[in-house]
Image: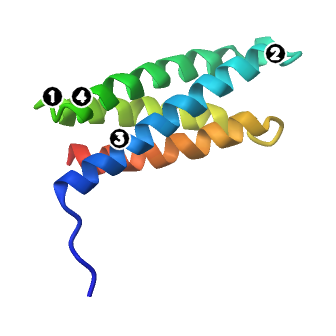
Amino acid sequence: MTQPVTNAQMMQECLEACLACLRACEVCAEACLDEPDIDMLRECIRLDRDCADACALTARLLMRASALHPEACRMCAEACAACAAECERHAGHHDHCRLCAEACRRCEESCRRMAA
């Protein structure tokens, strides 16, 4: 029989998802800047940066078990959803966008669980 997941375990999983997403968004934004058709990727870069910032704030609040973490998780989930949707538009052409979208979806899911 499996053990129920504790709140501490959920917080740790969410923290790890936020940090992975932060990293993926920063890598994606930087890679987008090196692409030849940067005009097509402007919104992707903007959302990557917003999502990375949301993940960083949420991670810090989770690390200290702040009472504000549920609100941060809600905001982070929204940022992740928007970033994932944009990156998915480019995922067929850019591997960094595909990887970012995957990390964003994982983080979005984890943050929605924490916000509930």
Mark 1–mark 2 Cα distance, whole angstroms, equals 37 Å
Query: Which of the two discs, 2 and 3, sits closer to the camera?
Result: 3
Check contact, mark 1 vs mark 2: CB within 8 A: no
Cα–Cα gap, marks 1 and 4: 7 Å
Earlier in the chain: of badge 1 and badge 2, it is: 2
Neighbourhood count class around disc 1 (C-alpha, 10 Å): few under 14, some 14–19, many 20 upward? few
Secondary structure beneath label 3: helix
- Disc 1 secondary structure class: loop
Which amino acid type corresponds to the residue marked 4 in the rendered image? Leu
Residue of label 3: 15
Amino acid under disc 1: Leu
Residue at the right extreme, as displayed: 36
**Residue found at x 56% / y 37%:** 84
Q: Are marks 1 and 4 in contact (CB under 8 Å)?
A: yes
The circle on residue 34 is 2
Q: Crowding near pointer 4: few (<14 within 10 Å), some, many (20+)?
A: some
Residue at image coords 70%, 35%: 97
Q: Point out the frontmost of discs 1 and 4.
A: 4
Residue 15 lies left or right of residue 69; in this view the side is: right
- Quarter occupied by residue 46: top right
The answer to whether residue 81 of the structure is visible from this angle is: no
Indicate the amino acid at tag 3.
Leu
Choose the circle earlier in sequence order: 3 or 4: 3
Q: Determine whether label 3 and label 1 are within 8 Å by CB.
A: no
**Comparing labels 4 and 2, the label whose residue is closer to the camera:** 4
